[in-house]
Image (cartoon, rainbow, N blue to C red):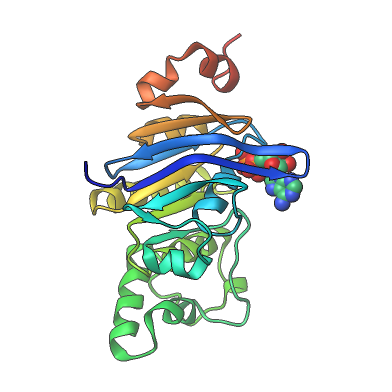
Amino acid sequence: MSPAVFEVQDLTVRFGGVTALDGLSLRHDSGGVVGLIGANGAGKTTFVNVLSGVVRPARGRAFLDGRDLTGLAAHKIARAGLTRTFQNLRLFGSLTVLDHLLVPYGARNHGRQRALALLAEVGLAGTESRRPAELAYGEQRRLELARALALDPRIVLLDEPLAGLAGSESDELLSLFGRLRDGGTTLLLIEHDVPSVLRISDRVLVLDRGRLLADGTPAEVASDPEVRQAYLGDD
Ligand code: ATP
């Protein structure tokens, strides 16, 4: 069997008395968009934090393409092909838009060209000399995304990328995610907007108190009675 794009085995994370992830095991073999939903505190961000090297698990392992990432530093995990965006944006106030991408690409000519092409791809053409504070909020979110894409990752973890965006902006971002998926990048999407997740995902994972409550295609997950009751407003 070829290695999974990503896999976790028996992942357990505790914060004091709180068990944020409780022996979670799953593997994802193909690309596409994987939606990750669940109530506040279900463990979604913790899952992304473990995969990206921000949090160490108390127990269990995480793999990317068969390579054990558990305990590696975040920058090594990024170089290995797994990058992320943050729920609260982490941009550098003193750097221009272009500088944000020259950090991963390098400032040589080739790096600049790739950076400018990536800015165009995410809809930020013409903003390269601005600083984050001079961008609209939706543009700041795209810059975070561009930075995560700059390393040509195999998988990008997106922590609530649609939060705070107007409807038209989130539609544009969702179509960008579709294009990235079609280009072969796997996306793991944490999102509170469940209808959008169901619309765009190939697979949906539902976390509940650190365990998998449901896992399947959007249609399968949307017809699960427990999921319907908890997330889709059924009584
Ligand atoms: P949300 O949708 O609100 O972002 P989530 O599903 O991402 O929630 P997590 O942020 O992963 O959930 O949190 C899971 C549990 O772990 C929660 O009970 C949370 O309070 C707890 N937790 C997360 N990070 C920490 C931390 N650094 N210190 C203490 N407890 C934490």
The picture places residue 82, in percent across and down from the top left corner, at: 41, 59
Q: In screen coordinates, is 59 left or right of 185? A: right
Residue lying furthest right: 17
Query: For this rendering, which residue is in front, 79 or 220?
Result: 79
Q: Residue at x 58, y 72 (%)?
A: 132
Q: Is residue 171 visible?
A: no
Please determine whether, in this image, residue 57 is positioned above or below residue 77: above
Query: For this rendering, which residue is in front, 126 or 225?
Result: 225
Residue lying furthest top: 235
The picture places residue 184, in percent across and down from the top left corner, at: 25, 52
Q: How many marks?
A: 0
- Write down the quadrant of residue 229 in the picture: top right
Query: For this rendering, which residue is in front, 163 or 29?
Result: 29
Please determine whether, in this image, residue 230 is positioned above or below residue 170: above
Q: Residue at x 34, y 91 (%)?
A: 108
The picture places residue 111, in percent across and down from the top left corner, at: 33, 83
Please determine whether, in this image, residue 201 is positioned above or below residue 188: above
Q: Quadrant of ligand 1?
A: top right
Q: Quadrant of the C terminus?
A: top right
Q: Residue at x 37, y 65 (%)?
A: 80
Q: Quadrant of the N terminus?
A: top left
Query: For this rendering, which residue is in front, 50 or 194?
Result: 50
Q: Is residue 120 visible?
A: yes
